[in-house]
C-alpha cells in the first residue's frame, strides 16, 4: 500500500470507529414531553405516609434519565425524599422539597411511557400560604428537557410538631425509638423492620454509613419501597459488623429521642449524637 492510500485508510478507520463509540445525540424530532400528573395514592395523609405520583410522558428517545417534581407542600406539611445533608428539620426541608425519579436508582422501570415518583409526608415549619400547584421537569438521556405546571393541593391531617410563628414554643417532651426486635448477634439472610416514626410520631430516616470502618460493600443494607424513604427493612447479608445509624427529624414538640435496643448506643460522627448501633452478624 502506497503512503497516500495508507493515510486515507487510517482516516476512514477512525471515522467508522468514532461512529460506534460516539455519545448519544439529542433526538430533536422526538423530545421528551410531560403529558400528565396523577396522584396514585389517596389523602388525607398523616406524617410518615407515602405519597406517589404517576408522571406520564412521550418522546425522549433513547430514554428518560430523570423526573423531578417540585412544590408538593401546604402551609404546614412538606413531602420529602431522603434527608438534607446539613440537618433534618422543618426549615431545611421546606427549602429542599423536590421529589426525584432516576433511571439509575430504581429497581424496576415502566415501559408504558410513565414512571412512579414517591415521597413521604413530613411536618414543616409553618408558613402563611400554601402551594397551589407543582412543577414537573423531565430530562432524557441526551439532556433535552421539558417542564409543565399542574394545579395541585396537598391534603394532609394537621399535626403540632412545629410551633406557629409568633407563638411560644413549648417545653419539649421526651421521645423514644425502639429497635429491640433486632437481636445483638443476628444471623445472615434475616430481615428486620425499622420504624418509620418515633413513639411520638416523628419521622426517622435510617442509613448504613460507608467509610473506612464500614466499606461500601457492607455486610448489611436497608431495603425500601423507594430510594430515600423513611424506615425500611434491615437485611444482614454476610458475617461481620453492621453499623446502623438513626436520623430522626428535629421538631419543636419533642426532644432528641432515647433508644431501646439489644446492642449499646455509640456516638455517630456525623451528628455527634448517640444514635449509632453495631450488630455482629454470625
Image (spheres, grey):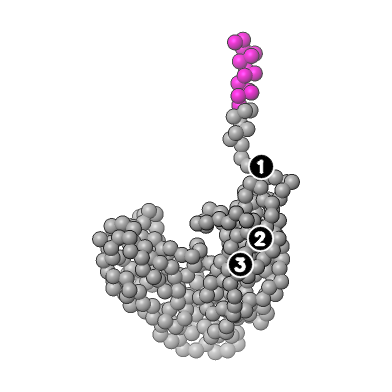
195 to the left or right of 68? left
Name the foreground residue: 58 vs 15: 58
For residue 254, above or below residue 59? below
Q: Which residues are magenta?
A: 1-14
Residue 152 is one of the magenta-drawn residues? no
Let me know if residue 90 appears in the view: no
Q: Residues within 10 Å of mark 1 (few under 14, many from 20)?
A: few
Q: Secondary structure at mark 1?
A: loop
Which quarter shows the N terminus?
top right
Residue 269 in the image: state x and y as whole percent. 38, 65
Mark 3 and mark 2 in contact (Cβ < 8 Å)?
no
Q: Residues within 10 Å of mark 3 (few under 14, many from 20)?
A: some
What residue does disc 1 label? 25
For residue 20, above or below residue 269? above
Mark seen at residue 56 = 2
Q: Which of the 4 image quarters holds residue 53?
A: bottom right
Residue 165 in the image: state x and y as whole percent. 60, 84
Amino acid at each position: 500500500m502506497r503512503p497516500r492510500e495508507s493515510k486515507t485508510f487510517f482516516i476512514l478507520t477512525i471515522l467508522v470507529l468514532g461512529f460506534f463509540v460516539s455519545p448519544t445525540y439529542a433526538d430533536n424530532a422526538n423530545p421528551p414531553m410531560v403529558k400528565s400528573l396523577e396522584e396514585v395514592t389517596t389523602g388525607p395523609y398523616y406524617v410518615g405516609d407515602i405519597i406517589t405520583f404517576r408522571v406520564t410522558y412521550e418522546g425522549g428517545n433513547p430514554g428518560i434519565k430523570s423526573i423531578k417534581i417540585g412544590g408538593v407542600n401546604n402551609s404546614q406539611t412538606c413531602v420529602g425524599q431522603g434527608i438534607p445533608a446539613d440537618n433534618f428539620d422543618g426549615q431545611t426541608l421546606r427549602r429542599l422539597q423536590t421529589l426525584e425519579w432516576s433511571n439509575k436508582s430504581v429497581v424496576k422501570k415502566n415501559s408504558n411511557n410513565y414512571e412512579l415518583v414517591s415521597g413521604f409526608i413530613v411536618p414543616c415549619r409553618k408558613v402563611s400560604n400554601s402551594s397551589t400547584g407543582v412543577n414537573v421537569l423531565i430530562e432524557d438521556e441526551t439532556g433535552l428537557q421539558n417542564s409543565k405546571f399542574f394545579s395541585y393541593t396537598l391534603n394532609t391531617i394537621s399535626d403540632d410538631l412545629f410551633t406557629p410563628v409568633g407563638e411560644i414554643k413549648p417545653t419539649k417532651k421526651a421521645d423514644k425509638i425502639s429497635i429491640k426486635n433486632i437481636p445483638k448477634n443476628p444471623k445472615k439472610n434475616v430481615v428486620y423492620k425499622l420504624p418509620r416514626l418515633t413513639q411520638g410520631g416523628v419521622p426517622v430516616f435510617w442509613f448504613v454509613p460507608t467509610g473506612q470502618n464500614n466499606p461500601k460493600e457492607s455486610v448489611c443494607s436497608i431495603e425500601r419501597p423507594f430510594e430515600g424513604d423513611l424506615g425500611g427493612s434491615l437485611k444482614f447479608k454476610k458475617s461481620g459488623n453492621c453499623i446502623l445509624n438513626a436520623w430522626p427529624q428535629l421538631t419543636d414538640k419533642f426532644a432528641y429521642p432515647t433508644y431501646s435496643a439489644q446492642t449499646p448506643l455509640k456516638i455517630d460522627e456525623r451528628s455527634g449524637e448517640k444514635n449509632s448501633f453495631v450488630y455482629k452478624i454470625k
